[in-house]
Image (tube, rainbow, N blue to C red):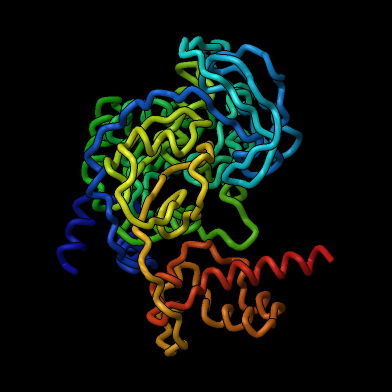
């Protein structure tokens, strides 16, 4: 304990003794990170396949509306899906070639109108217009909207909506580099290999929004990414971008926990960070914003970690949006023999899928392939209270689960089930193997259904 305290003081992190207290009492669990296979592997550019598929629903909110028809010739960066009014985002071609299909296809967010492009391998580009030197908030937000930037951390929220704040409304800028989901190393490699770009765009955002200080949050055991960012910050000769070390606990990457840990600001149910003057973006989203502002590129590619015991050659790859999972698997040497579970995302919050022909979308962070083991049988609750003691948002998961199984859906209101952040800690830690998260999510769906009646 004294060694941890000494290390924390030596790091010179924000918050004084209150910050130390928060660090030592942070909620969460220690779980094996399984990052050893990919954390030191450089990002590889993956060759784009012959055909790519672009679902118009690859972000939170309304699907985009197709702007091309069969036979149209497109370039990298050509607008192929235009955002609808409200929460939506533009979609751009990630290869040059010909539109060969416009119709319904299956994607990770279900069936939606989709566009298939035949790659001509010319990689002709259609870039965004150059920005003037003095960028206003309006210019910045407009550029994010045109480029189709959405959050790369897994939620897929349109960035232009998040950044649509007046300069006097923004008090804090937080860059989320705490990649707490096991197996995932895409953000880690982004920080290691693009630290200079991350610092440069962070400086510009501070200037545009007139914010005094930015915090880049990293977990304490992420030495290589911390060193790269620290070097980039010193090289840039800036004093208002600071690294903030978070304890290596799951789920420290969640925005509400991170903001409380770094700034001491509690986000209550129904609130967004922007409501409290906080701009928070995932570190890979920040890199995408750099490409949009300084390279005039629309959002058309992303870093994905391909890993797990069932993949032959785990990698961190730069993949064109719209590439099918099967093409990525082939580029990683295929599978080992045996039954497997395919997961988009990490093992805690990711979603399983069967169809390898699904195309990666804007918020695909990780493709995880696990060995399918025999499922442990669920047993009765032993009243150990681990799920309650370790819930990062102080819920009572077993009571919510009981309410769902007893059809007492209204109890969800009393038990604040809608405050669940779906981190999966409760299910992971339960010695009786009760799928608590599944019950909580089902109860919340029932509550939504009752509201709609």
Q: Residue 56: give x, y in percent of width and height.
A: 66, 34
Residue extending furthest toward the left: 3
Q: Residue 432: give x, y in percent of width and height.
A: 41, 82
In the displayed structure, 293 sits above or below 311; it is above
Nearer the observer, 418 or 59: 59
Residue found 56% across the figure and 82% down from its top: 399
Residue found 22% across the figure and 56% down from its top: 9
Is residue 64 shown left or right of residue 187? right
Residue found 61% across the figure and 40% down from its top: 59
Is residue 235 shown left or right of residue 72? left
Nearer the observer, 323 or 242: 323
In the displayed structure, 198 sits above or below 93; it is below
In the displayed structure, 33 sits above or below 283; it is below
Q: Which quarter of the image is occupied by the N terminus?
A: bottom left
Nearer the observer, 145 or 428: 428
Residue found 64% across the figure and 28% down from its top: 115
Q: Can residue 428 be seen here?
A: yes
In the displayed structure, 257 sits above or below 235; it is below
Within the image, what quadrant is residue 429 found in? bottom left
Within the image, what quadrant is residue 8 found in? bottom left
Q: Which quarter of the image is occupied by the C terminus?
A: bottom right
Q: Residue 242: give x, y in percent of width and height.
A: 33, 41
Residue extending furthest toward the right: 453
Q: How many marks?
A: 0
Within the image, what quadrant is residue 298 found in? top right
Q: Can residue 131 be seen here?
A: no
Residue extending furthest toward the front: 337
Q: Residue 260: give x, y in percent of width and height.
A: 46, 58
């Amino acid at each position: 304990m004294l060694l941890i305290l000494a290390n924390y003081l030596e790091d010179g992190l924000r918050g004084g003794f209150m910050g130390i207290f928060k660090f030592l009492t942070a909620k969460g669990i220690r779980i094996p990170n399984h990052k050893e296979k990919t954390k030191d592997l450089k990002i590889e550019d993956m060759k784009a396949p012959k055909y790519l598929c672009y679902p118009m629903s690859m972000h939170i909110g309304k699907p985009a509306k197709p702007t091309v028809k069969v036979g149209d010739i497109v370039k990298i960066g050509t607008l192929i899906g235009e955002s609808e009014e409200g929460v939506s985002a533009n979609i751009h071609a990630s290869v040059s070639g010909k539109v060969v299909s416009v119709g319904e296809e299956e994607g990770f967010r279900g069936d939606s109108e989709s566009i298939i492009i035949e790659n001509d391998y010319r990689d002709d580009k259609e870039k965004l217009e150059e920005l003037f030197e003095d960028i206003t908030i309006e210019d910045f937000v407009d550029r994010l909207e045109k480029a189709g930037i959405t959050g790369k951390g897994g939620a897929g929220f349109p960035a232009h909506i998040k950044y649509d704040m007046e300069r006097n409304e923004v008090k804090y800028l937080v860059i989320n580099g705490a990649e707490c989901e096991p197996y995932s190393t895409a953000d880690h490699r982004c920080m290691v290999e693009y630290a200079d770009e991350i610092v440069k765009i962070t400086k510009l955002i501070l200037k545009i929004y007139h914010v005094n200080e930015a915090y880049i949050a990293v977990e304490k055991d992420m030495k290589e990414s911390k060193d790269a960012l620290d070097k980039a910050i010193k090289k840039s000769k800036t004093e208002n971008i600071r690294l903030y070390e978070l304890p290596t606990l799951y789920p420290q990457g969640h925005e509400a926990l991170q903001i409380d840990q770094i700034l001491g600001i509690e986000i209550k149910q129904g609130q967004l960070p922007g409501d409290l003057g906080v701009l928070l973006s995932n570190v890979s989203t920040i890199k995408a914003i750099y490409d949009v502002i300084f390279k005039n590129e629309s959002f058309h590619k992303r870093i994905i970690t391909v890993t797990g015991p069932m993949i032959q050659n785990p990698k961190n790859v730069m993949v064109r949006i719209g590439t099918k999972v099967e093409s990525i698997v082939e580029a990683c040497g295929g599978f080992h023999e045996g039954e497997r579970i395919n997961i988009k995302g990490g093992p805690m919050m990711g979603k399983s899928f069967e169809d390898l022909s699904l195309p990666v979308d804007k918020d695909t962070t990780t493709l995880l392939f696990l060995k399918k083991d025999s499922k442990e049988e669920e047993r009765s609750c032993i009243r150990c209270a681990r799920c309650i003691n370790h819930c990062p948002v102080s819920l009572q998961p077993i009571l919510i689960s009981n309410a769902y199984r007893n059809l007492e859906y209204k109890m969800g209101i009393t038990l604040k089930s809608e405050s669940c952040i779906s981190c999966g800690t409760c299910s992971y830690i339960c010695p009786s193997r009760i799928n608590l998260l599944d019950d909580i999510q089902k109860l919340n769906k029932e509550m939504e259904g009752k509201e709609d009646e």
